[in-house]
Image (cartoon, rainbow, N blue to C red):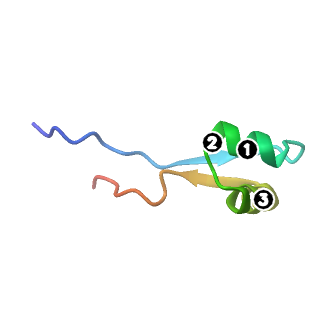
Amino acid sequence: MNAVPEIRREKVFIPPEMPVQEIKEKYGLSSKRAREVLKQGFFVKNYSKKQMT
């Protein structure tokens, strides 16, 4: 039995009217990343963490 929790990646879509400050608070992103996410329209949650295969 594996004691390490499985990390799932999830694509999170951001509505274009959501302000940068709210994105920062809700998802814990930096100011720079929040602006990039708003421009792109989505981000992948847990992207930089190792994922179980």
| Amino acid type at mark 2 | Tyr
Q: Secondary structure at mark 3?
A: helix
Residue 35 is marked as 3
| Amino acid type at mark 1 | Ile
Q: Residue at x 34, y 54 (%)?
A: 51
The number of callouts visible is 3
Residue 27 is marked as 2
Which corner quadrant of the image does residue 40 belong to? Answer: bottom right
Q: Look at the image and tell me in which quarter the N terminus lies.
A: top left
Crowd around label 3: few <14 · some 14–19 · many ≥20 (10 Å): some
| Amino acid type at mark 3 | Arg
State the image coordinates of residue 31 (x, y, percent, origin top left).
72, 56
Residue 48 is marked as none
Query: Which one is nearer the viewer's eye here, 1 or 48?
Result: 48
The relative height of residue 39 versus residue 21 in the rendered view (above or below) is: below
Mark 1 and mark 3 lie on one chain; the one further toward the N terminus is 1
| Mark-to-mark CA distance, 3 and 2 | 13 Å
- Mark 1 lies on residue: 23
| Mark-to-mark CA distance, 1 and 2 | 6 Å
Q: Secondary structure at mark 1?
A: helix
State the image coordinates of residue 24 (x, y, percent, origin top left).
70, 45
Mark 3 and mark 2 lie on one chain; the one further toward the N terminus is 2
State the image coordinates of residue 30 (x, y, percent, origin top left).
65, 55
